[in-house]
Image: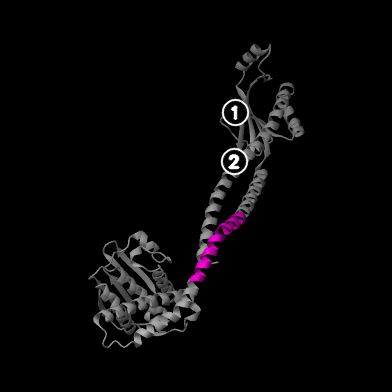
Amino acid sequence: MSDDSRGVIAKILALYLITSGISLLLFLGLFYAKQEELLLLEGAERLKEARGAIFVTLRERGVEGLAPLSEDLGLKMALLHPTKGILYSNLKEIPLFEREGLQERSGKVYLHLRFPLGREGMMKGGGRHHDEMVERFRRGVGEAVLILEGEDIQRALLWLRWKLLGVFLGALVMIGAVAYFLVKLSLRPLHEKIETLNRFIKDSTHEINTPLSVIMMSIETMEREGLSAKNEKKIRNIELAAKSLSHLYEDLVCLNFPHSIPQHREEIFMEGLLRERVDYFAPFASRRQVRFSLEIAPATLKGNSYKICRMIDNLISNAIKYTKPEGEITLRLSSGKLEIIDEGEGMSQEERSKMFERYTRFNRDQGGFGIGLSLVREVCLEHQISLDCESEKGKGTKFTLTWEEEKNNG
């Protein structure tokens, strides 16, 4: 599987897992909130059941009956009087609430109640003694406050969180495994077609070598004396076409058969190499009415001469393709730096972000397969050469290559 295929699968899986994870989190969050509510309600029901027994005890036995009742029920409670303070409490800390009813604090449920408490004890409203009780309450000292503490559900909530986290991670793993299988299954036909295309390109590249060599050798050894101007022009056209095909062939070999390229590195004198490649491309530039401007100083680079040659060839070839007729291509070489500047169409910011992707082309009229700049980037990465591109639509493009001469020569 190629790096590009792995990248596509990784992006699809990441997107799928992120969306699935968000959906899972929403579902599990709602489930957790519901379970927390149920735990609180269970604790509240127990407190509500105990409330009646506490009221009866206060009415019949007074405050003294709360201690044994609390022990029998297994409840913690507090009874507060507005003026006398704490009448009874077995709570470690008495929480204060602003309103009556069920309350939750620090994972515990509390029941907060207010009721009239006169001089002679608790007053229970309702029934035929209601008026008398109200009057006794008015002569009393106000309302008493009863606080009942339920069970601590913190441990249950913590266990629920860990359990839901396990479910979340397990579900993500299962979703990821299924998604990976489905993505690979859906991409298999495309992958097989790409493999078939790559095999075709490799086989075609291999088969091109022999006839191309014959053509180039025939042109070089051909006797041109006595040829008419018309035939001489045809021979030059054949030679240019053969060189173009040779250039494409060398790029395909570099991309598809890297093992066939000598891997040793040597000190390359960039001045001589650059002049040689300019001479090679001079007929192409002349045909497009493009001229070269050379500003060359001595420079060296330690690397693979074949790959460095391919890198320079592709940058010069691109400059020739996209420079306007009667335009100029400037090549500046100095110690550790090479600049190739054309007066071509230029590129937008979006095009610059994609220009190093293999098979990417922005102008179908100029031919090619969109592999040149991809190859340039690979060679630069391999040789630790910094590659920078400045371009503006309609104003041309400037490629700058920089390297450390001392490092390469060392």
Q: Secondary structure at mark 2?
A: helix
Left or right of 177, for residue 299? left
N-terminal-most mark, 2 or 1? 2
In the picture, the disc for residue 338 is none
Q: Quadrant of residue 113?
A: top right
Structural distance between the alpha carbons of marks 2 and 1: 27 Å
Q: Position of residue 222 (x, y in %)?
A: 33, 87
**Which quadrant would the N terminus be assigned to in this image?**
bottom right
* Image height of 101 relative to 366, above or below: above
**Magenta region: which residues?**
176-200
Left or right of 274, for residue 75? right
Q: Position of residue 386 (x, y in %)?
A: 38, 72
Q: Quadrant of residue 80?
A: top right
Q: Is residue 242 visible?
A: yes
Three-letter code for the amino acid on which mark 2 is drawn: Leu
**Which quadrant would the C terminus be assigned to in this image?**
bottom left
Neighbour tally class for label 1: few under 14, some 14-19, many 20 plus, Cα within 10 Å: some
Three-letter code for the amino acid on which mark 1 is drawn: Glu
Residue at coordinates 32% horizontally, 85% vertically from top-left?
A: 272
Q: Secondary structure at mark 1?
A: loop
Q: Is residue 2 visible?
A: no
The main secondary structure of the magenta stretch is helix
Mark nearer the viewer, 2 or 1: 2
- State how many labels appear: 2
Q: Position of residue 16 (x, y in %)?
A: 54, 52
| Residue at which label 2 appears | 30
| Residue at which label 1 appears | 100
Residue at coordinates 24% horizontally, 69% vertically from top-left?
A: 325
Residue 383, magenta (yes or no): no
